[in-house]
Amino acid sequence: MKYLHTMVRIRDVDASLRFYCEGLGLVEKRRMENPGGKFTLIFLAAAGSPEAEIELTYNWDSTEDYGTARNFGHLAFRVDDIYATCARLQAMGYTINRPPRDGHMAFVRSPDLISVELLQDGQLPPQEPWASMPNTGVW
C-alpha cells in the first residue's frame, strides 16, 4: 500500500494557495481543470515529502456549506523553526489558534477552517511572545 493524498475542499483558490504555499511553504505539483465537471484539483506537497500530497478541490459553482471543518481533524507538518513559521503566518494575517508555547507544537487554521498542526523538528526553548500567548478560538 502507498499513501497518495488527503483531499480538502476549498472555497477560494487564491486564498488557499496563499496560505498553503506562501504561508506554509508547500509547492504546487500539478493542477487539473475539469470544465465538464466544473472543478479544479490542485496537488501540493512539502519539499521534504514530495510523495505525500494535499489535494485542494475547488468546485466552481458550489454554494455548499463546508461547515467548520471540525469533523476532518487536522493536517500536520514538521517545521524547521516553529517560531519563524508562526511569525510568518501571523504577519500574513492568520490567527495562531494554539501558539507554540512549549517550542514544539502550534495550530493554525486555513482560510477554509482546516486545522493545521505545526510540529517543531526537535524542541526549541520557550520564547516570547509565544510562551505567554493564550489560545485563540478553536482548532
Image (cartoon, rainbow, N blue to C red):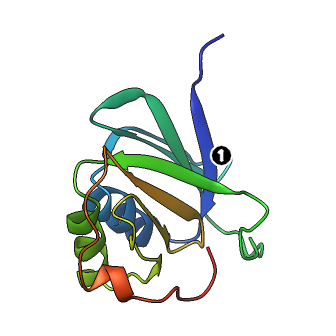
Image x and y of residue 29, in percent: 35, 35
- Closer to us: 89 or 54: 89
- Which residue is denoted by mark 1 in the rendering? 36
Vertical relation: 81 (above or below) 6 = below
Vertical relation: 105 (above or below) 47 = below
Residue in the image at 74% along x and 70% along y: 66
Vertical relation: 92 (above or below) 38 = below
Quarter of the image with the N terminus in it: top right
138 left or right of 133 in image: right
- Kindly identify the amino acid type of the residue bearing the numbered disc 1: Gly
**Element at label 1:** loop
- Closer to us: 132 or 95: 132
Image x and y of residue 34, in percent: 57, 44
Residue in the image at 39% along x and 74% along y: 101
Q: Quadrant of residue 13?
A: bottom left
Image x and y of residue 131, in percent: 34, 80
